Image (cartoon, grey):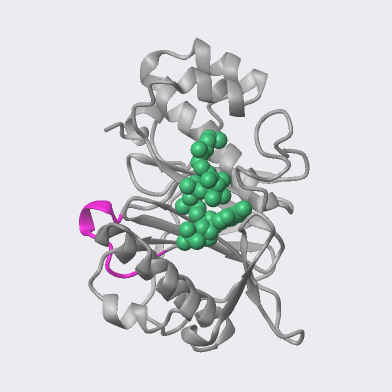
Amino acid sequence: MNTPETELGPPRKCADRRMTNGRSWPCLHPGEVHIWKAFLDGSTYERDRALLSAEEADRAARYHFAQGRMRFVAGRALLRTILGGYLDRPPAELAFSHGPYGKPWLVQDEQEERLHFNVSHAGPVALFAVTKEGELGIDIERIREIHDWAAIANGCFSPQERTHLRRLPDSRRRPAFFQAWTRREALLKASGDGLTGESAGWPHAPDAGYSVQSLVPVPGYLATLACAFPAPRTVFLTWLGAPASTASATVELPNMLS
Ligand SMILES: CC(C)(COP(=O)(O)OP(=O)(O)OC[C@H]1O[C@@H](n2cnc3c(N)ncnc32)[C@H](O)[C@@H]1OP(=O)(O)O)[C@@H](O)C(=O)NCCC(=O)NCCS
């Protein structure tokens, strides 16, 4: 597996901090995005399942493999716990609705300050981005071999990104590919279109008006945060329970494709 830190130089910024479960919750200030990193395991499965809505429990039951079910349940329970922490509301009482292409949003009273969030998972790693500023999208991918990278790039990336990718040596192409991939996905998730919406795929993917930040949340993974508002101050938080081997600080990456 690639370790982007080695290939891309030393970390530029490390700002992770750990929270004690449910206490002294971090304040979400205007202009901030909080990015929570978590490792989804089944250690609190029964407790987690009790937090889910009937619709979520139904979806969990439809997972064919136990690992997928366990990660979905843990991810939804954690999303509820994190959002409930900011709103000072019990996690099980939160209700979600979805945009036309599946983007979930929180159902809130008019008096309540609006919270925006987006979630991404790659294997056991999950990222939860939360802000009061406006719409945002986050995507994480494990850096891995992609045999048909050129075909994917032709379908999803800009001509400039494709040209850069082709010119890169093999060792640098893989992380650069995933930087472009997560960027595209994060933008599509920020707009809510996902892969099935109207702006999915180049040349319609929306870039203008969005700020993007490329991150290495865990060695061997790449992530992008896209925000429909000016570049936020990002605060990185790690949910307790991360294995020591993966509890590294989140690192920001320069653009490898310009
Ligand atoms: C659903 C999609 C938005 C992201 O899927 P993904 O990358 O497989 O999954 P992620 O873990 O990053 O994100 C899933 C989460 O995004 C959220 N989500 C779902 N639909 C969304 C949408 N239209 N917009 C924003 N967020 C969405 C949900 O919270 C979901 O979590 P859940 O499964 O627990 O409900 C969609 O773009 C997709 O199917 N992508 C496939 C990836 C691909 O082939 N990319 C090609 C390279 S560009």
**Which quadrant holds residue 147?**
top left
Q: Going 71% across and 85% down the picture, which residue do you hit? A: 109
**242 within the magenta span:** yes
Residue 157 versus residue 140 in the image, above or below: above
Looking at the figure, which quarter contains the N terminus?
Answer: top left
Which residue lies at the image location 27% right of the left edge and 68% below the top edge? 241
Residue 169 appears in which quarter of the rendering? top left
In the rendered image, residue 120, in percent from the top left (x then y), is placed at: 48, 54
- Figure check: 5 above or below 117: above
* Quarter residue 52 falls in: bottom left
Q: Is residue 51 left or right of residue 258?
A: left
Majority secondary structure of magenta residues: loop
Q: Left or right: where does residue 63 sit relative to residue 198?
A: left
Which x, y percent locates residue 27?
A: 57, 76
Spot occupied by residue 28 in the image (x, y as percentages of width and height):
60, 72
Q: Decide which of 214, 182 is in the foreground and name it.
A: 182
Q: Specify whether residue 69 is painted magenta.
A: no
The image quadrant where one finds the C terminus is: top right
Q: State which region is magenta.
A: 238-247
